[in-house]
Image (spheres, rainbow, N blue to C red):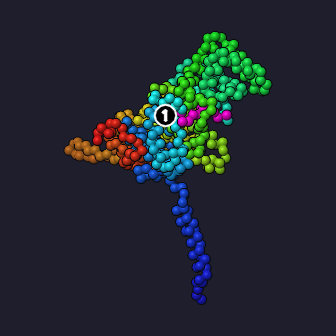
Amino acid sequence: MGIELQPGPLHYVSWLFAVPVGWFVYGAFRPGKESRYVLTLGGVRWNEADFCRGWEIDGRTGSGKTASGVVPILHALKRNRPGMGILALDTKGDLSEPIEAVADDLGCRADLRQLEVRPDNAPPGWKPPYTLNFLGDPSLPASTYAKLLVDVATAAGQKGGQTFFKNAAQVAIQNGMSLLAALDVPVTIENCYRLVMDMAELEARIGELEKMPGPLRDPLLDYFREFKAQPKEQLGGVRSTVFNYLQPYTVSDIAEVFCPTEPTFDLAEIDLGRLVSVKIPQKYQTEKRYVSLMLKALYYLHALRRYDLSGGERARKNLIVGVFDEAQESVLLSEDGISDYNVVDKIRGARATAIFSTQSPTSYIPPMGGRDKADVFRLNLGNKIHFTAADKDASEMIAESIGKRTIKKRTWSSGSGKRSVSWTDEDQYLIKPHVLRRLPKHVAIIKHCEQRYRWVRLPPSPFTKPKVADVSRN
């Protein structure tokens, strides 16, 4: 007895294949479809999960870190994920113009938010394009802000002094903010500074508080009565510590942008796809460092707070990226607070990451207090781009992180008229340090967090201007 194939079932089978194939074609080519990959660079591709495992970019001055690394990455990210938000911080202010050029190229200039401090050549009537109150989020408790301010000051160099005065200053800042909030006075760093440092101002505010009913009044009154009653030298020590922690933000040009009573920008807007950069004149070197550290700490905290959302809400959030050029100058280090080395590996699950760019990986060692923490920090940055190594120490540190391989080494010996051959195992660098020091400009070694190292040439971005030295060579 034979088996006869019926045409009917074949007709249905054809539909079983046609329907999913049709959906695949539609899904693959439908307008506005997001690419599976957020970045392609030097022939290497990253999906979002791998991209969010942190970035280390290093190379000597003029090797192409910014033109061939940072800026092309930002352009590709914003092109592939238009809703992505970026916070870019750099000590020289070099990133502002390339970011503007990227926004113009991609038609998203409306997303630009440049926090610019009054330039030296500002015309009469100049106003900052955007302002941000560092203490402007009422959902954050005063204790959190006070801790951030102390951690930032410590990272900026305020490491000395007695623990008592450090803790007392933090409590004074916390209660100063609480007093301002209770009186419905704008809570800014400048107002808090004035409250603690000007005893006449403090007396006036305490008088206002005494006239107000409410459960928050009595604890604040008790604290400030004890604050004023301290021995003169002790009170002076607390107030001078508060001065050191807050004064850099109160310089008039800095306060105009970062201590406004009516800010025009909130860092939470990074969730709306904003491109945020900072431009501060070079004369404000100390103030610039405090501002950069505070913005970085707030970015980390913003990313970490996404974990307070449900898994579904978190998945619907956009990708956000912090870009930190000359990153060794804005290292956060707090044993009981926010630090670079213990945060960068946590935020990736919140659809956030950070890109760190520096001349040499050895530059992380001093601000992090030793090689061990610097190594932990670098291990948490899974993606690497190594341009020309800055010096011998840098090349050896990079070569060590790239790894070694074991080879068989043959040796000959002779004696008693006999010749013998022996083999020994020897570990050699996969890429030798002297090779890393001789990499040509715009040539780099890329390490995808899940793939092998690759040698690539990365053409400079058209959105960066050639350096004067480069132009003079042509």
Residue at the far left: name it. Answer: 417
Residue 131 among magenta residues: yes
* Residue occupying the far bottom of the picture: 1
**Which stretch is magenta?**
128-138
Residue ranking furthest to the top: 232
Is residue 144 among what the camera can see? Answer: yes
Mark 1 element type = strand
Residue under the point 62% across and 32% down: 262
Mark 1 is on which residue type?
A: Lys
User: Is 140 drawn above or below residue 223 in the view shown?
Assistant: below
Residue visible at 40% across and 46% down in the picture: 462
User: As displayed, is residue 398 above or below residue 8?
Assistant: above
Read off the residue under disc 1: 279
| Quadrant in which the C terminus appears | top left
**Dividing the picture into quarters, in which one does residue 263 lie?**
top right
Rendering coords of residue 241 (x, y %): 58, 19
Question: Mostly what secondary structure, the magenta segment?
Answer: loop
Nearer to me, 101 or 249: 101
Q: Nearer the viewer, residue 27 or 52?
A: 27
Pick the quarter of the image with the N terminus.
Answer: bottom right
What crowding class fits label 1: few (fewer than 14 Cα within 10 Å), some (14-19), or many (20 or more)?
many
Q: Residue furthest right?
A: 213
Say which residue appears at 63% left-offset and 43% top-offset. Answer: 307
Quadrant of residue 201 in the image? top right
Q: Residue 26: image x %, image y %?
A: 55, 65
Residue 148 highlighted magenta (yes or no):
no
Residue at coordinates 59% horizontally, 41% vertically from top-left? 269
Quadrant of the rendered structure where residue 11 is? bottom right
Asked whether, in this view, residue 205 is left or right of residue 464, the answer is right
- From where the camera sits, is residue 371 visible? no
Up/down of 196 relative to 448, above or below: above
